[in-house]
Image: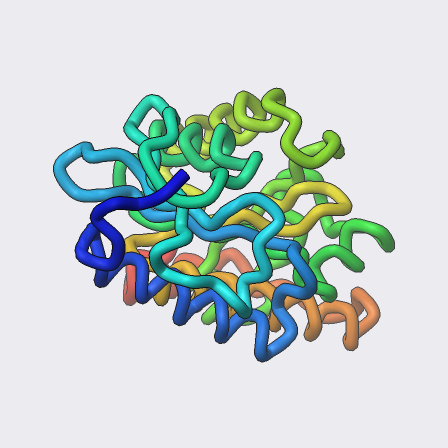
Amino acid sequence: MSDISGMSDFAAQREEICRVGRSLFDRGYVHATAGNISVRLPDDQGFLITPTDACLGQLQPDQLARTDRAGQQISGARASKTLTLHRAIYAADPAAQCVLHSHSTELVALTLTGVWRGDAVLPPITPYFVMKVGRVPLIPYHRPGDPAVAGRVSAAIQAAQARGAPLRAVMLDRLGPNVWHDSPASACAVLEELEETARLWRIAEGLATALSEAQLEDLYSAFGARW
């Protein structure tokens, strides 16, 4: 499907998706054709998302798929099969403007060896993990692209909102994290902090001590960080 408007159609968003995708690929956060990135377009004009089976290190701006808000393709290469999940995240969290999925090594390995808890795959071991990421629940395994995942992720987002600590990420068992924020760069930063915390936890062999309730309360008072 050709994009007759090419680069002029939301050019800045297209360029940013490609820049972040290339950065993630070059640094080993994604490999081969794993991972995907989407953005919510302004004024309810739909979404841009990376094509199915695309290498994030070799994205071309005019090949990115554009869909309407219902997920119907408008232009570009065929949209990633994870569009259903991305749309569910956008619907559940109005603040989300970018959704990013990776198969990051440390985080996938964490699900293979055992997460901390089902409602929090990692404990709050560093202040920046609490401030920049927060609690990350585990979503039970489903095959890639299974539309049932969207419902589970929506429920997790709504449950977190109800307790006053909105999510910025979920972990798909054996598949890796989905993170979201207000831009591709911000979502990338969430992923980086999440992956680094998983690395620290695995290096410490599960022996690192979580921050105390008093320390968590101090982060809430100083920075508004909720766990």
Q: Residue at x 77, y 46 (%)?
A: 174
The residue lying furthest to the left in this view is: 43
Number of callouts: 0
Q: Residue at x 34, y 39 (%)?
A: 75
* Residue 99 in view of the camera: no
Viewer-proximal residue among 176 and 50: 50
The correct choice, above or below, for 29 with respect to 44 in the image is below
Viewer-proximal residue among 225 and 87: 87
Tell me where residue 225 appears, x and y as whole percent: 36, 57
The correct choice, above or below, for 66 with respect to 142 in the image is below
* Residue 5 in view of the camera: yes
Looking at the image, what colour scheme do you see? rainbow
- Left or right: where 152 falls relative to 220: right
Q: Residue at x 31, y 45 (%)?
A: 3
Viewer-proximal residue among 87 and 50: 50
The correct choice, above or below, for 74 with respect to 5 in the image is above
Tell me where residue 210 appears, x and y as whole percent: 63, 63
The residue lying furthest to the right in this view is: 113
Quadrant holding the N terminus: top left
Q: Which of the 4 quarters of the picture holds residue 54?
A: bottom right
- Left or right: where 49 falls relative to 58: left
Tell me where residue 125 appears, x and y as whole percent: 60, 67
Viewer-proximal residue among 24 and 194: 24
Q: Which of the 4 quarters of the picture holds residue 109?
A: bottom right
Q: Residue at x 35, y 53 (%)?
A: 181
Tell me where residue 202 appears, x and y as whole percent: 78, 69
- Left or right: where 14 falls relative to 44: right
